[in-house]
Amino acid sequence: MDRSPAQDAARHILTIIPLVMRTVAAELRAGGDMPAPAHFGLLASLGHQPRTLTELAQMQGVSLPTMSNSISTLVERGWVTRSSPAGDRRVTLVDVTPLGRTTMDRVTRAAEAHLAERLAGLDAASKRRLHAGLNVLERVFGPPPGTGSVRAVRTRASRSRANPGTRRSV
């Protein structure tokens, strides 16, 4: 069966993205920056706004008990808090703490440094092609048109963290 260029690109993405993430995770673990890479994703998800336990489980594609165990670990480390909005114990709201934000910022900087070091050896033309390809992926997988780029969404989230009164309610 002949494969289309889109199928070839899909297979390439499914090969390369996990390879990049495994490499970064291994470097972060080796440097002692993050004990479990999955925690990085959870902190990133919570960096934009508090989420319910159910939302987090759905976002990560895991069961509620699995997510509850992960959140318990983050609570023990002081990176997140759990609460019940308006006293409704049926709903668990998870929010990142100042220590969690500091940890997330530190790990992000470390991950960026590791990636930058790996990419530093590319020639200028390769770097331009890489940026062009990443822009294509951002257009395909990023926020819908009109909501801004991934970078703009991250910038708005950083501003909201600096000024918690601007955060959207859940």
Image (spheres, grey):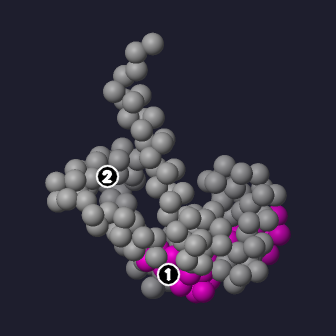
Percent position of residue 85, x then y: 72, 73
Q: Describe the element under mark 2 as helix, strand or loop.
A: helix
Dot 1, how many residues are within 10 Å of its Cα: few (below 14), some (14-19), or many (20+)?
some
Percent position of residue 109, x then y: 43, 77
> Looking at the picture, which amino acid does disc 1 mark?
Arg
Residue shown at 34%/69% (left/top)?
A: 116
Q: Is residue 86 magenta?
A: yes
The total number of labels drawn is 2
Disc 2 designates what residue? 134
Residue numbers of the magenta segment = 85-109
Indicate the quadrant where residue 42 lies: bottom right
Above or below residue 3? Residue 43 is below
Q: Residue furthest top?
A: 1
Residue shown at 32%/63% (left/top)?
A: 119
Q: Is residue 23 left or right of residue 66?
A: left
- The circle on residue 141 is none
User: Which mark sits nearer the N-terminus, 1 or 2?
Assistant: 1
Residue shown at 42%/70% (left/top)?
A: 114
Disc 1 designates what residue? 106
Percent position of residue 78, x then y: 69, 84
